[in-house]
Image (spheres, rainbow, N blue to C red):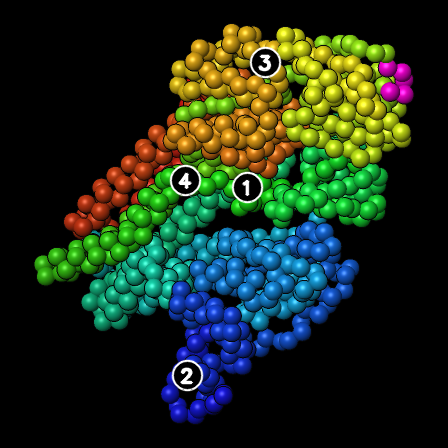
Amino acid sequence: MTEYTKSGQVLKCTHCGENCAEEAILANEKSFCCEGCKLVYEILDENNLCTYYSLNSSPGISQKNQSKGRYGYLRDSTLSKKLISFSDGQKTTVNFRVPQVHCSSCIWLLEKMPKLNKGIISSRVNFLKKEVSVLFSEKEIHLADVAELLANIGYPPEINLADEQTKVQKKDYSRWYKIGVAGFCFGNIMLLSFPEYLTGKSVLEPSFKLLFGYLNILLSLPVFFYSASEFFKSAFYSLRQKFINIDVPIALGIAVMFVRSVVEIVLQTGPGYMDSMAALVFLMLVGRWFQNQTYHTLSFERDYKSYFPVAVTLLKKEEEQSIPLSKLKVGDRILVRNNEIVPADSLLVSGDAAIDYSFVTGESEPVKIVKGSTVFAGGKQCGSAIKVEVIKNVSQSYLTELWNNEIFSAKEKDKHEPLINTISKYFTIAIILIAIGSALWWLPSNPHKALDAFTAVLIIACPCALALSSPFTLGHIVRVFGRNGFYLKNAAVVERIAQITDLVFDKTGTITVAGGSQIVYEGANLNNEELLVLKSLFSQSSHPLSTAISQRIDVNGRTEIDSFSELPGKGIKGRAGEMEIKAGAADFAGTVDNGNVKSSRVYININGKYKGVFSLTIQYREGLKEMLSTLSGVYKLALVSGDNASEENTLRGVFPSGSVLRFNYSPQDKLDFIKQLQSNKRKVLMVGDGLNDAGALKQSDTGISVSNNLNNFSPACDAILEGSNFHKLPVLISFAKKSSVIIGISLVISLLYNAVGLSFAVQGLLSPVFAAVLMPLSSITVVAFVTMSVRVMAGKSGL
């Protein structure tokens, strides 16, 4: 039962931590500032989610002035469609911006939303972007109710229904204003303090000295209360969460200098340190701006135009034209073949669409799409080729976000991250203790030096350079790779490449080039109708052999293919009218393979009768033997292929002695081969084309998909290598291994900087202003070292 109290005792709200009004609401021996906070608590309590309050003290958001039913307008389907990023008619995904997210408790609670409503399937938080992605069942809960639920637990979503293309990103100039105010005041305080710099004794009359002192106080107020506010706010929120961040010692140093200066000026015992305080804030803000600019350049929410080397098949007057993804526009009609990814939200124009949304939701059951309905970006076509019309431009980061979905994410993280986090965690506490110790040491003999030592220690020591070492190094290496046609899912992939011990290669489409093959047909004569059907069948598949044969069959036109399916490791089949066709392996087509023939062979069966075979002479990639020879000096090599062993002797002459060659391997066999190597503590890099080896790519420690200007991108891979740069693989792997050396040296530089700076600071030999100058220099030094090192090594490696 709810009670109200007027005892006069100041009570804190259990949910949000704010002071309760004169009439606090009491329920279950808990106090609340409003009915809204009490309701949120009761919702969490009913669902056994009160662990939320144990993670941080008073982590909630006040529910005062929160209006009910404010999201009713989202029940309008026209409006709600603007927010939905995916829907198959049963399950829907929506991304909400929730600015109130501020701590680990927020993340914990938001990711427990499925417990609050059975209609919510999953929820994931992107803390840096302050966004929550919610997957929910349309039958169980409406979009408006999802938004209302977020508001009820203290995280009202910020909704902008403007079209994404017309949204204008407002720039935040607040830091520039703060730097400007601090710089202006700093210059004027120095001007007023100039007589104090000329001689040890003041040359001013006492009345002028007092006037200039008060003017300095006046000029320092905007510096202290406005320009330095972000340091104090950050320190306050940190201490409120029972954690000490780097801004705590900085705020403490600024406060000590300000208070002491005010006391000295008012009591006329000295000129104070307002010039040093203003200079400190100005230089710290400039350093913080530089640091933010650095992190901005390290952002890995990458533009698909630079990081996805896939192409799309554009249809112009029914003619196919391969174009880069970056040139795809709203209104374009494209052809999406079997196993190809739909790159942008589109309308189905023709064809039987069975879309696998596992790339988006993790569930692989294909969804049937009717003509005129929306096919969402990230879906994979399963079946015959479909034609779609693009209705929304490709999102700048959507495909990259999908690629980094936790469903496909690697299990290992940056190995340097735990070390850096551990150092940073105890770094600030140690610095505060050193500062206090230095002040106590000098206080009896030299109070002025005690203040300088205390403040300088707090300012000079900074873990920022430590934190920059790993991400900045890996970020530069990712950029070098991108310029050389090697595109990584994220920076952590560099670390995993550096640790590999074994390389496993697929054959067709990976070490071979189908486009340059000579194609010969042997068997019964095929009439024009049969050739037309075969060409149409092969055009449904993105497999290199299918593509090559489709391009070589010289007949005009296309025919519709029904009941198309592609069986990995076996072949493709489909129906056109009364004609049923199978194409692929010998047993799939109802015949026997001649294993002595040194070519890739695709057998044809029409209406249950074996017709003939297309033979493709195998052309290996240029420089393959030399590349493998270079790799064999460091790694163990293996080849796993679904083809027969007709090329074994040739390949034994290409692969170095000691290499493992396996043929007639199914996709499951390839995956099991990777598992066997890993069971022996080997770190495996798998190189394939992403078609019949997606399972092996996902299982491997690092999976690289070789792209041949086709939209056969596999979400299971960790990196994409353009086929034209395949010969660079040894250099790219070697370059990744050098990342650990650069990171190690930059960490040593950071630690040496702090050690040397502290040694001078504790002796009182370093002024707070000089310490403020040196602090950002540590980050600049690390950034400069990493930038130069990566450039030099890239140049020496030919990258």
Q: Mark 1–mark 2 contact, CB under 8 Å?
A: no
- Count the labels in the image: 4
Whether residue 586 is situated above or below residue 118 in the rendered picture: above
Q: Residues within 10 Å of mark 4 (few under 14, many from 20)?
A: some
Q: Mark 1–mark 3 contact, CB under 8 Å?
A: no
Of residue 489 and residue 747, the one placed in the foreground of this image is: 489
Residue 52, image quadrant: bottom left
**4 vs 2, front mark:** 2
Dot 4 or dot 2: first in sequence order is 2
Q: Is residue 625 left or right of residue 216?
A: right
**Residue at figure coordinates x 72%, y 60% from the top left:** 80
Q: Mark 4–mark 2 contact, CB under 8 Å?
A: no
Q: Mark 4–mark 1 contact, CB under 8 Å?
A: no
The residue at which mark 3 appears reads as 645
Q: CA distance from mark 4 to mark 1?
A: 17 Å
Dot 1 or dot 2: first in sequence order is 2
Q: Amino acid at mark 2?
A: Glu
Q: Which mark is residue 414?
A: 4
Magenta stretch: includes residue 398? no
**Residue at figure coordinates x 58%, y 44% from the top left:** 401
Magenta stretch: helix, strand or loop mostly = helix
The residue at which mark 2 appears reads as 29
Which stretch is magenta?
526-530
Q: Amino acid at mark 3?
A: Ala
Q: Mark 3–mark 2 contact, CB under 8 Å?
A: no
**1 vs 3, front mark:** 3
Q: Is residue 639 left or right of residue 249?
A: right
Secondary structure under tag 3 reads helix
Of residue 674 and residue 220, the one placed in the foreground of this image is: 674
Secondary structure under tag 1 reads loop
